Structure formats: structure tokens, C-alpha cells
Amino acid sequence: MMGENFDRNAVDFLEVAPENWIGVGGRYGRWFQDFTERFPFLLHGLSLSIGSPEPLDMELVGAIKKFIRQHNIRGYSEHLSYCSDHGHLYDLLPIPFTGEAVMYVAERIRMVQDTLGERIAMENVSYYAAPGQEMSEQTFLQAVLQEADCDLLLDVNNIYVNSINHKYDALGFLKALPTDRIRYAHIAGHYDEAEDLKVDTHGAPVIDPVWQLLHKAYEIHGVVPTLLERDFNIPPMPSLLKEVEQIQRIQAANLTEENYVLSRR
């Protein structure tokens, strides 16, 4: 991932999935400890499965709490989706956009927050079907944030992908989000399956319309910490850092005393 000569000033923070590092010892554990001592870190979970019909994995939540303390982690986020039902399903599946689901999910988020002793951020996810839909994605997302009293991890690429796949106005969706809930942001590339079907992959460079949407996000909600996600097809580090630099340029273009947001919590 990064060598010993990696420039500390090239990035502001890093993010990992806790499931990949909890319990890791030996050389890799020492390597990770060295990085958490040098860089601010955030956690982005993969398997909390907040919308699952199965009970929450409180053993995992307890391990995450210990991990946060051990490595001075700055925050924990998860996906507003589910990925398990009598075992892991190895995908992030959509929670039905219903009033019942709002109350169910919000209660589970509050349980996690109570156990951790801190607020968490839930990510607006990409989805490719909306079973049992009673309300819009926008209404569902805002209702969960309000009822759970949690933060939002704003994924800009997911807004773009969903706006194409489900034919809604990405800018309108962005404008309607509650500014005071946004903890930080993600930006990534995706795959064009067809003109009207985009697949969120984190395996390609960020495209111009998504960069433009990030610019609008800062204009509307203020500049927030923003992570570049890349899960595979990872280019050489200089190429990757050019995209990080693009984030920094867009941030600088929007940076004023009035709209700068580093941390609200």
C-alpha cells in the first residue's frame, strides 16, 4: 500500500475496514500501529449489517470499540444497508424505504452508538433495486439520520450512480441533505454497464461529473474531509495521489472561513 518513504504531507487522513485489522498481530500488526501513530485514521465498516433481520453482532461492536481506543481512531462509519441473514451474503443489499424500516434501523444505530459511546456516520449507499418502496431514498435517508441522531458519511459517487440508475436529480438530492449531519465524504470511480446503468465499483478513476458534484457539495455544505476510495485496479502511487490532489484543489477553491468544516464532533 505505502512504503516507508511515503510523504506524510500527501494525505490528511486514512481509512480502513476494522474487520480487516482487528486481531491482526505480528509484523502486520506492528506495521499498522506505526501508521495509526503517524496518520489520523477513520474506520469504515463492512459487516455491521445495520438493516439485517438478524440480531446485531454486539461482539463485533465491542471489538470495534476496543480497536478505536487502541489506535486513537477519529470516527467510525458504516453502510446504510445490510449484508447478512443467517450468514454473510457478501454484498451490500438495500434496506426497504419504509417507515417501519426507519424505526428498526434507527434503533439499531442507537444501540451501536450507546455501546461505542460516540456517534457514528451512516453512508448513503448505491442500490440497484428498491423492494417494498414507500418513500424516496432522500426521505428515507433523512428520516434515519433524524430518528437515530447519527451522522452522515456523504458518498458523492453513490449519489451520481443512483441518480442515473433511478432517474433523479443528483444536485437536488445533494441540496436536500442536512448540512449539520455530514461528518465526512467519499469519492470514487464506477463502472459503466450501460448508458443508464452505473455500477459502484471503486475500481476506476473518478469521472468529471462526479468531480463537479463534489465541488457542488462543498459549495452547498462546506468543505469536509474527503476520502478517495480505490479497492482494485489500483494504479501506481503517483497516479493515485493525483486524484487526492484534485480533491485538495477543489477544497481550496471552496475554502472560506464561513464554509470550512473539519470536525463537528
Image (cartoon, rainbow, N blue to C red):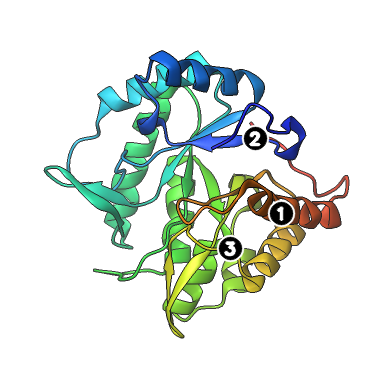
Q: Which residue is mark 3?
A: 205
Q: Where does residue 185 sit, x and y in percent of width and height?
A: 60, 49
Disc 1 to disc 2: CB gap under 8 Å: no
Distance from disc 3 to disc 1, alpha carbons, whole Å, reads 10 Å
Circle 3 — which element? loop
Q: Is residue 249 left or right of residue 205?
A: right
Q: Position of residue 66 (x, y in %)?
A: 41, 16
Quadrant in which the C terminus appears: top right
Could you classify mark 1 by the number of other residues whose Cα lies within 10 Å: few (under 14), some (14-19), or many (20 or more)? few
Q: Tag on residue 13?
A: 2
Residue 63: image quadrant is: top left
Identify residue type, mark 2: Phe
Measured Cα–Cα span from mark 3 to mark 2: 20 Å
Q: Which residue is mark 1?
A: 242
- The circle drawn on residue 43 is none
State which tag comes first along the sequence, 3 or 1.
3
Question: Which sits in the foreground, 104 or 54?
Answer: 54
Q: Is residue 104 left or right of residue 13?
A: left
Q: Residue at x 32, y 38 (%)?
A: 48
Q: Is residue 95 above or below residue 20?
A: below
Name the amino acid, label 1.
Lys
- In terms of secondary structure, where does tag 2 sit? loop
